[in-house]
Image (cartoon, rainbow, N blue to C red):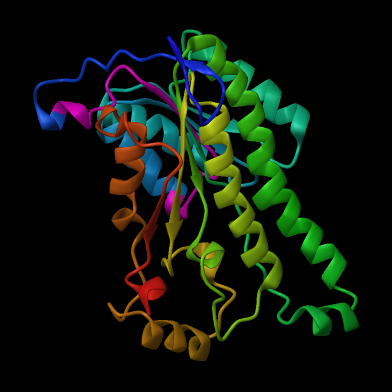
Amino acid sequence: MAKTIATGLEVPQPRPKLPSHVMDMFSLKGKVACISGASSGIGGAVAVAFAQAGADIAVWYNSHDGLVKTAKELAEKYNVKAIAYKCPVTDEQKVQETIQQVQKDFGGKIDVFVANAGVAWSEGPLVEAQERGAASKEWDRILQTDFQGVYYCSKFIGTVFKKQGHGSLVITASMSGHVVNVPQLQTCYNAVKAGVIHMSKSLAVEWSGFARVNSVSPGYISTPISEFAVDDTKQKWLEMTPLGREGLPEELVGAYLYLASDASTFTTGTDIIVDGGYCCM
């Protein structure tokens, strides 16, 4: 053990014992992974990928109880354990209780947590939303789900990771935390996602003695969260994206798998942007 100047904390120094084959480094066999917001879109694709990689998965949903059936199908198809849990991430007590239940159901450990649940801003310019009387309600909805929800998941899984002495937290951020998207105006969403990225970096430093924390920043992905946008808006997105199209959820799973696996044992406090080149413009 040695004390680092960066944190003032004593952290373990031994190098990890890594598999000799690169494909084994990306395997999640023997690991337990939680994914919030797993009923569709990015979270759904990550759940499938993790099951394919051998992880036992605890998938969370808020209102789409079809995930219960999906979890059973994934368990049978990929020969893993998969259980669905109804847990609104805005409910602090429920988040704590669900994490505790996952521990009980999966042998007392959680190796990976993907804080993915989120909602999009749909009210347009802030002043106009205020004039309609919608700004405060919508701002609170975004803040509670996309920021407080990540905070609740982080603090309770952090306790688990600290007791175990290991763990990987992966937070779904957004390219909106790096740039101001146009033509849609979404100050609240942009600000919250920027905060989530910095929360991830800050936790990476705080947890350096026992766990890793990273984030993934997707660009425009073809998921239900982008359904608020009209065709003209989406066309502008494509014009401003060097690859000229929306991404598929499956095109993100490599980043999540990397951060969850032993291939990333020296990666913490980073954010992986997967946006078709939008942020480099």
In front here: 139 or 66?
A: 139
| Residue appearing at x 36%, y 43% in the figure | 256
Q: Is residue 37 magenta?
A: yes
* Residue 228 painted magenta: no
User: In the displayed image of the protein, which residue is found farthest to the left?
Assistant: 21
Q: Which residues are magenta?
A: 24-42
Residue drawn where x is 31% and y is 54% of the image: 250
Name the residue: 31% across, 39% down: 257
Q: Is residue 218 left or right of residue 244?
A: right
Report the front residue among 188 and 72.
Answer: 188
Q: Position of residue 10 (x, y in %)?
A: 50, 15
Quarter holding the N terminus is top left
Q: Say how many tags the image has.
A: 0
Percent coordinates x, y for residue 22 in the rendering? 12, 31
The residue under the point 38% across, 80% down is 281
Determine which quarter of the picture holds residue 202: top right
| Residue 34 visible here | yes
